[in-house]
Image (cartoon, coloured by chain):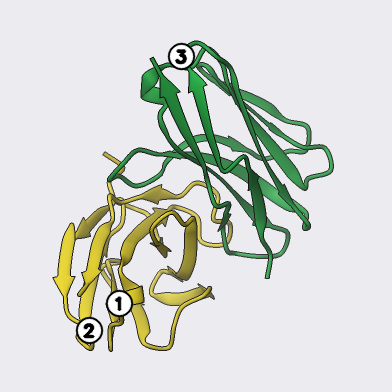
Chain colours: A yellow, B green
């Protein structure tokens, strides 16, 4: 158990809908990262937050947004969903803000868009 | 953007064989990390490397930070069936905050 909690584990929805994925980092970790893993693909970095502020942005679509709350949990919002958004979405946390170093991953949310 | 080239994409080996995989980048990296992902789970950190030339072991796993700082290697000795999974290299480039992942090496071990 990495200590990073993601909910829900599975999500099935339809095209055009909006969903929210939730992540609770390890106790004490200030940084939260979101990654997308499509079938047979590597991990695509989406976005990073550190202590509530956006720190780095990757290949995140404009239809996607995220935030980190004062209690350090984070949410990833995906809207106007398309079939191609079906993927495993991972949240990771690390204790260090500037240097990513060791990331600890949650078990992921499997999103299926039908 | 910056990318990591990880090879091979997949490996089919016999139990007991040694395995070697590597990652290269066009940029200099400050940190190299190796992760393993089991089916249905998130990646788990295996080894972290922080200095050029560093060689670090974790049980049957050994990883090295290349002296050019643009590559890293992971070796697994005497493979066993539970080594099956996807192995990712990851690194943080100089001056950046993002951790970049390779596409992964899928390892299949036949008993």
**Residue at which label 2 appears:** A15
Number of numbered tags placed on the structure image = 3
Q: Nearer the viewer, residue B20 or B34?
A: B20
Residue B28 on image: x %, y % = 78, 54
* Tag 1–tag 2 contact (CB < 8 Å): yes
Q: Is residue A39 above or below residue B39?
A: below
Residue B18 on image: x %, y % = 58, 17
Q: Is residue B88 left or right of residue A62?
A: right
Residue drawn at (51%, 61%) of the image: A97
Label 1: which secondary element: helix
The circle drawn on residue B15 is: 3
Are labels 1 and 2 assigned to the same chain? yes
> Does label 1 or label 2 sit earlier along the sequence?
2
Q: Work out how far the residue at label 1 is from the one at label 2, CA to CA, in angstroms.
A: 6 Å
**Residue at which label 1 appears:** A83
Q: Work out how far the residue at label 1 is from the one at label 3, CA to CA, in angstroms.
A: 39 Å
Label 3: which secondary element: loop
Q: In terms of image quadrants, where is residue A18?
A: bottom left
């Amino acid at each position: 158990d990495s200590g990073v909690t993601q909910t829900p584990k599975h999500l099935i929805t339809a095209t055009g809908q909006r969903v929210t994925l939730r992540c609770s980092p390890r106790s004490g970790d200030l940084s939260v990262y979101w990654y997308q893993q499509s079938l047979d693909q590597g991990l695509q970095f989406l976005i990073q937050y550190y202590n509530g502020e956006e720190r780095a942005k990757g290949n995140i679509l404009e239809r996607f947004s995220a935030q980190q709350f004062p209690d350090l949990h984070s949410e990833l919002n995906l809207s106007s969903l398309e079939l191609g958004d079906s993927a495993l979405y991972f949240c990771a946390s690390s204790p260090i803000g500037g240097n990513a170093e060791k990331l600890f991953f949650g078990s992921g949310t499997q999103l299926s868009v039908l | 953007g910056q990318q990591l080239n990880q090879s091979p994409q997949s490996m089919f080996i016999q139990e007991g064989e040694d395995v070697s995989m590597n990652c290269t980048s066009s940029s200099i990296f400050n940190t190299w990390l190796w992760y393993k992902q089991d089916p249905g789970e998130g990646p788990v950190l295996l080894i972290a490397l922080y200095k050029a030339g560093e060689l670090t072991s974790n049980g049957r796993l050994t990883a090295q930070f290349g002296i050019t700082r643009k590559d890293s290697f992971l070796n697994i000795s005497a493979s066993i069936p539970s080594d099956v999974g996807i192995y990712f290299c990851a690194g943080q480039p100089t001056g950046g905050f993002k951790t970049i992942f390779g596409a992964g090496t899928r390892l299949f071990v036949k008993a």
